[in-house]
Image: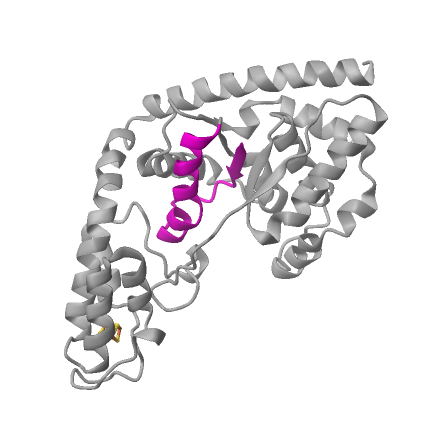
């Protein structure tokens, strides 16, 4: 099983619930490879690489602190395994350009990031690199959200095309469709770094409580005596994720009758969030300020990944008769 993330710096609660918690489960169920997709970050951010190293470091610290265990899985950085680029190049030879142009996320992303010039070859070829990332480890399963399904389909098409043209080297990886619980940010919109509404794994307890204190609630509940509607309150959506059933039921009832106020309600959920995050905060201490330890994990993982990748490239060379 293989999965990667672009280095985007500190991880927030949405990333923890949406991806990392699944990864932590997968590392027990599969021979799992998790990688920092730093070359992919260049496909859209090639013009500004000033913080990429910092982002890689921060992201790795969050992975490891959240429970990614290098003794159970392989953690590496894409650019430390140059054979990804070799396979990407060889796949480029057999990839029809229309396969890439019809990729729905290609045009969507171009629209979304209009301020950047994304007419580059690297951006168009992004799914080819992604296919190389997956197939170089002969991954059988890849966790994906529904929006990523077309990319994985392209990976399978490329595997088929290669196997038909030369000889069977690659499996056709299957999607592991992941349930991603939606987490809203402190302003009620989707939690996102760019909206400045995120709660980070690296926030202190004080930061967390302060963010909760100013978090939006049911806007119609102006006075303490006004009854509220938990169904439209973002704080209640946190209760549903972090609180035990008894507390969720209590808030659900007492909010509607104004028996509980928002300050107490936020304290209840805050206590539970602190409990959930405390082990991560403690684990962070082991990594923050210990760059050598972090480097050792990455070096070992990258070396292990490179060995597997080199074996596949050997088979690929043999198949192409290079
Ligand atoms: S009591 Fe809780 S659920 Fe109800 S509006 Fe206030 S914060 Fe939201």
At which x and y percent is residue 109? 64, 55
Question: Toward the viewer: 120 or 156?
Answer: 156
User: Can residue 281 be seen from the camera position used here?
Assistant: yes
Stretch in magenta: 1-30
At which x and y percent is residue 239? 27, 62
Q: Residue at x 32, y 55 (%)?
A: 199
Left or right, residue 272 beside residue 143:
left
Compared with 106, 314 (above or below) is above
At which x and y percent is residue 262? 20, 73
- Which quarter of the rendering shows the C terminus? top right
Question: Toward the viewer: 165 or 4?
Answer: 165
At which x and y percent is residue 261? 16, 75
Left or right, residue 316 beside residue 246:
right
User: Can residue 207 be seen from the camera position used here?
Assistant: no
Compared with 36, 80 (above or below) is above
Compared with 199, 64 (above or below) is above
Q: In terms of image quadrants, where is residue 240?
A: bottom left
Assess whether residue 23 is covered by the magenta stretch. yes
**Ligand 1 is located in which of the four quadrants?**
bottom left
Q: Residue at x 78, y 50 (%)?
A: 101
Q: Residue at x 74, y 32 (%)?
A: 159
In the rendered view, how is the structure colored? one colour
Question: Toward the viewer: 269 or 26?
Answer: 26
Assess whether residue 8 is covered by the magenta stretch. yes
């Amino acid at each position: 099983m293989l999965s990667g993330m672009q280095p985007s710096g500190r991880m927030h609660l949405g990333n923890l619930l949406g991806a990392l918690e699944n990864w932590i489960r997968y590392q027990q169920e599969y021979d799992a490879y998790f990688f920092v997709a730093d070359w992919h970050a260049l496909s859209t951010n090639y013009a500004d690489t000033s913080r990429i190293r910092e982002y890689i470091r921060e992201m790795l610290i969050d992975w490891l602190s959240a429970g990614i265990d290098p003794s159970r899985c392989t953690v590496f950085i894409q650019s430390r395994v140059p054979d990804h680029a070799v396979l990407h190049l060889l796949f480029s030879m057999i990839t029809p350009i229309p396969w890439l142009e019809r990729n729905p996320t290609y045009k969507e992303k171009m629209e979304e990031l209009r301020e950047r010039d994304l007419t580059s070859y690297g951006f168009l070829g992004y799914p080819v690199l992604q296919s190389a990332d997956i197939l170089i480890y002969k991954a059988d399963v890849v966790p994906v959200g529904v929006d990523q399904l077309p990319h994985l389909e392209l990976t399978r098409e490329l595997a088929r095309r290669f196997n038909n043209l030369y000889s069977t080297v690659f499996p056709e990886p299957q999607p592991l469709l992941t349930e991603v619980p939606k987490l809203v940010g402190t302003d009620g919109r989707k939690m996102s770094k760019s909206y400045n509404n995120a709660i980070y794994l690296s926030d202190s307890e004080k930061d967390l409580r302060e963010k909760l204190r100013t978090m939006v609630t049911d806007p119609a509940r102006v006075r303490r005596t006004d009854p509220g509607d938990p169904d439209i309150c973002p704080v209640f959506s946190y209760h549903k994720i972090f609180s035990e059933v008894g507390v969720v039921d209590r808030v659900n009832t007492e909010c509607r009758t104004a028996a509980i106020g928002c300050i107490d309600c936020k304290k209840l959920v805050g206590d539970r969030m602190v409990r959930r995050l405390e082990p991560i905060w403690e684990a962070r201490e082991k990594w923050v300020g210990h760059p050598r330890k972090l480097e050792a994990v990455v070096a070992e993982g990258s070396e292990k990944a490179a060995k597997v990748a080199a074996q596949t490239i050997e088979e690929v060379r043999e198949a192409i008769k290079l």
